[in-house]
Structures are given as C-alpha cells and as structure tokens.
Image (tube, rainbow, N blue to C red):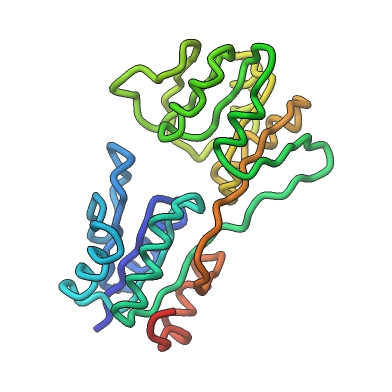
C-alpha cells in the first residue's frame, strides 16, 4: 500500500489532501509551522520542519513514504530543494504541484524585481502608502525604508509589533475577492502594491483590485528552484500517482 507525503502550505495542498481522502489513500499533509491555526484536514497532519534534506529523507524511510508531493509555496525554495535531495537519496518518486505564475494583462502597471532586496531598493524615495502583501517573514527587510506607511495583511495576529515605524495590520485569511480588496486599498489610501509572484487564484484579487484602481504593482519574481517534475493541477497529481509515478527519485 502506498503512503503519500504532501509538503503543504498552499490551498492546492489542502485540495489534494481532500481528494486523496475521498479515494481512501493513506496520506500525510505536512505544514512548515508558519500558520498558528491551520485548517483542519481530512488526512493525518504534522507541523514543523524535518531538519533539512537529511531529516526529510529519514522521515520518508521511517514512515514508509512511497510518494512525495511538493505542494509548498512557490517561494519556499529551501523546502523544495530539500525535497529534491531527499527524493534522490531515498529513491522516492517526487512531483511538484506548482501554481502557474501570474502575468500582466491589459490595464496592469507592473514593475518586476528579482528578489526581496531589489524590492526594498525600489522603494527609495518619498513616503508612500504601500500594501505589502508578503506575509510576516519578510517585514524586517522593509525597515530599511521607514518613510513609508505599510498596510500589512497577515493570517495570524503578530505576537510582536512589526519592525516598521508606520504600519497598519489587518488580520484575515483568504481567499479574497477583487471587490473586497479594492475596498481595502481605497479605505487605506494605498498607492502601491508589493507582491510576490505566487500565482494561483486565491491571492490574485489584489492584482485585479490594483488594476481597477490604476495602482502600480511591484512584482517580485520567483526564486530559482531545482529541476524536478512539475504539474499545475490536483488532477495531474492524481494522474501521476495512478499512471506516471514509477520512476524512482528525480
């Protein structure tokens, strides 16, 4: 009997877990632990890191994992790298469930930057009101631009005040809709949106809202990831499990 380990952290990971539960598959959904109260899932869950690629490989061996699905956030480069190494070490079939990146459409005003430091550098200049749609992990980097007022939407209320002299915290869990995000941007008088190119539909509402309001977007490119088989839908993962997952490792 196969046992599937899903490295989660995305909406798609939860959808995959539900689909596997419907099929009565044995699966474990693993969270990195960055969300304090993850949504209940219909499969076994675990929270916390593995201890790098070696720790993940050990978990795979000890728990008799037969298939590994990397459904982490597109910016979780370290975890994805560890998954590739662990799959190679243990000979475990691996597939990445990766969202297609966003692309600008007519009406968008996007400027692309390669990473967080480049985004911080791009914010030199007069004070602005910035919707910083990056989560809590990267907030400290923007303390280098203290002149701005940052509007922060976080899944969990911060235990410590964000390291930004001028900010507003909004605690909310997606998915969000364009009308709601448009109202939020207007209410807080945002004049710039900073976002990571996460892809998918659950976090795209802010981009539609910015488009409708004529606001510019500073878009941070995805980090480079190691080569691995990738699909973009849960249905493709199921097809891989049923028909294409015999190759060991990557």
Q: Nearer the viewer, residue 225 or 209?
A: 225
Q: Nearer the viewer, residue 76 or 208?
A: 76
Where, by quadrant of the figure, is residue 34 drawn? top left
Q: Quadrant of the N terminus?
A: bottom left
Q: Position of residue 238 (x, y in %)?
A: 45, 75
Horizontal side of 40 relative to 189 (left or right) equals left
Q: Is residue 116 shown above or below 249?
A: above
Q: Nearer the viewer, residue 80 or 153?
A: 80
Q: Quadrant of the C terminus?
A: bottom left
Q: Is residue 245 shown above or below 176?
A: below
Q: Position of residue 202 (x, y in %)?
A: 54, 45
Q: Is residue 141 shown above or below 64?
A: above
Look at 70% across and 30% down and name the residue there: 210
Q: Position of residue 108 (x, y in %)?
A: 78, 37
Look at 33% across and 82% down and name the residue there: 91
Q: Position of residue 10 (x, y in %)?
A: 44, 51
């Amino acid at each position: 009997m196969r046992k599937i380990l899903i490295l989660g952290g995305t909406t798609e990971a939860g959808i995959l877990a539900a689909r596997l539960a419907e099929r009565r598959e044995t699966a474990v959904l693993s969270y990195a632990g960055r969300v304090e109260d993850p949504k209940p899932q219909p499969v076994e869950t675990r929270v916390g890191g593995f201890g790098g690629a070696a720790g993940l490989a050990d978990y795979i061996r000890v728990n008799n994992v037969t298939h590994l699905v990397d459904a982490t956030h597109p910016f979780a480069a370290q975890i994805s790298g560890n998954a590739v190494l662990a799959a190679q070490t243990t000979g475990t079939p691996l597939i990445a469930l990766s969202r297609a990146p966003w692309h600008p459409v007519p009406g968008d005003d996007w400027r692309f930057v390669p990473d967080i430091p480049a985004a911080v550098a791009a914010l030199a200049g007069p004070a602005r009101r910035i919707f910083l749609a990056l989560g809590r992990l990267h907030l400290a980097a923007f303390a280098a631009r203290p002149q701005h007022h940052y509007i922060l939407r976080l899944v969990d209320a911060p235990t410590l005040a964000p390291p930004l002299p001028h900010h507003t915290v909004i605690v909310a869990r997606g998915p969000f809709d364009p009308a709601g995000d448009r109202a939020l941007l207007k209410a807080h008088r945002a004049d710039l949106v900073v976002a990571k190119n996460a892809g998918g539909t659950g976090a795209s509402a802010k981009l539609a809202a910015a488009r409708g309001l004529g606001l510019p977007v500073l878009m941070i490119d995805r980090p480079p990831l190691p080569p691995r088989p990738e699909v973009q839908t849960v249905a493709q993962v199921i097809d891989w499990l049923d028909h294409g997952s015999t190759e060991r490792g990557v």
